[in-house]
Image (cartoon, coloured by chain):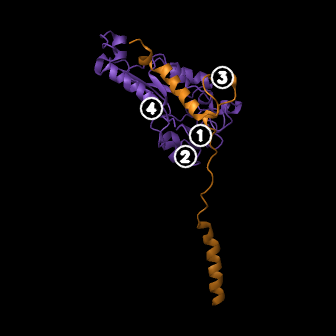
Amino acid sequence: MRKILFLFAVTAVLTLSACGEKPQDHAGIRSDQPAAAGTGVAAFTADGWKAGDQASWSNHLKARANYGMNDHLRAPK
Amino acid sequence: MARMKFICDAERCIECNGCVTACKNEHEVPWGVNRRRVVTLNDGVPGEKSISVACMHCSDAPCMAVCPVNCFYKTEEGVVLHDKDVCIGCGYCSYACPFGAPQFPSQGTFGVRGKMDKCTFCAGGPEEHGSQAEFDKYGRNRLAEGKLPACAEMCSTKALLAGDGDVVSEIFRSRVVQRGKGAEVWGWGTAYGTAAKQGA
């Protein structure tokens, strides 16, 4: 009787082990380099900012957006 | 930290499709795939309105939520990108997206439903910045070149605004304040002859 119980327990453990949770702590898909890191291709890179400097890149894009898109700012008053 | 956003000014958009052309040219997008398109409501009826639509790079992106292989990620600037090496081309993102942004090329991997392609906010993808591999899979990485998306920079009426959310919302706000509201708004009066509002 004990043997049967033992075998039943071992079988139950083995069969139910597949129902367990898999670890979900993987890193996910690889992420990108920050855009502020630049491309390293000087021919296509806009002037006025320093690659690798987040603040410089951010300020450059803000200035570019205002210059290129804010016509109310550029139009004579 | 910048949060990149698009806004399309429906009062200025003239349905020229310059943004669509700029996008296709900049990224050499294949035939049949439109990362951006212009949608017109009440086409041909006086008072019609057009807006340019692409991926809106949602803060809580439904495509990211439904992707079964978790191929999406968000950059530090809030741009929603995806990894084409992980994408299985199932199309769930297409069903989930309220803007119809995900596109499926009819050639390449998986035949008639290829790997998903969408607007990258000109931010490339998960490859080395400026590399040929990045260009082939995702298009040019203009953000890393210190430029804004080609569609917005090429927009002839500056209807399409792209950039840091704070900046584009301030540009849009200043326009709305100066042009007032109703049928006398800037674009309508200029195009159809109604007297433009003073100072607009």
Q: Residues within 10 Å of mark 4 (few under 14, many from 20)?
A: few
How far apart are the alpha carbons under marks 1 and 3?
Answer: 24 Å
Asked if residue B163 can be seen in this view, the reply is yes
Q: Are marks 1 and 3 in contact (CB under 8 Å)?
A: no
Q: Which color has been applied to chain A in this rendered view?
A: orange
Disc 2 target residue: B67
Asked if residue B117 can be seen in this view, the reply is no
Mark 4 on the same chain as mark 2: yes
Mark 1 on the same chain as mark 4: yes
Q: Are marks 1 and 2 in contact (CB under 8 Å)?
A: yes
Residue A77 in percent (x, y) is at: 38, 12
Quadrant location, the C terminus of chain B: top left
Residue A33 in percent (x, y) is at: 64, 38
Identity of the residue drawn at 63% across and 51% down = A27
Chain letter of the residue beneath label 3 in the structure image: A
Label number found at residue B166? 4
How far apart are the alpha carbons under marks 1 and 4?
Answer: 25 Å
Disc 3 target residue: A44
Name the N-terminal-most of marks 1 and 4: 1
Q: Amino acid at mark 3?
A: Phe
SS class of the residue under badge 4? helix
Q: Which color has been applied to chain B in this rendered view?
A: purple
Disc 1 target residue: B82
Q: Amino acid at mark 2?
A: Cys
Mark 2 on the same chain as mark 3: no
Chain letter of the residue beneath label 4 in the structure image: B
Mark 4 on the same chain as mark 3: no
Chain letter of the residue beneath label 1 in the structure image: B
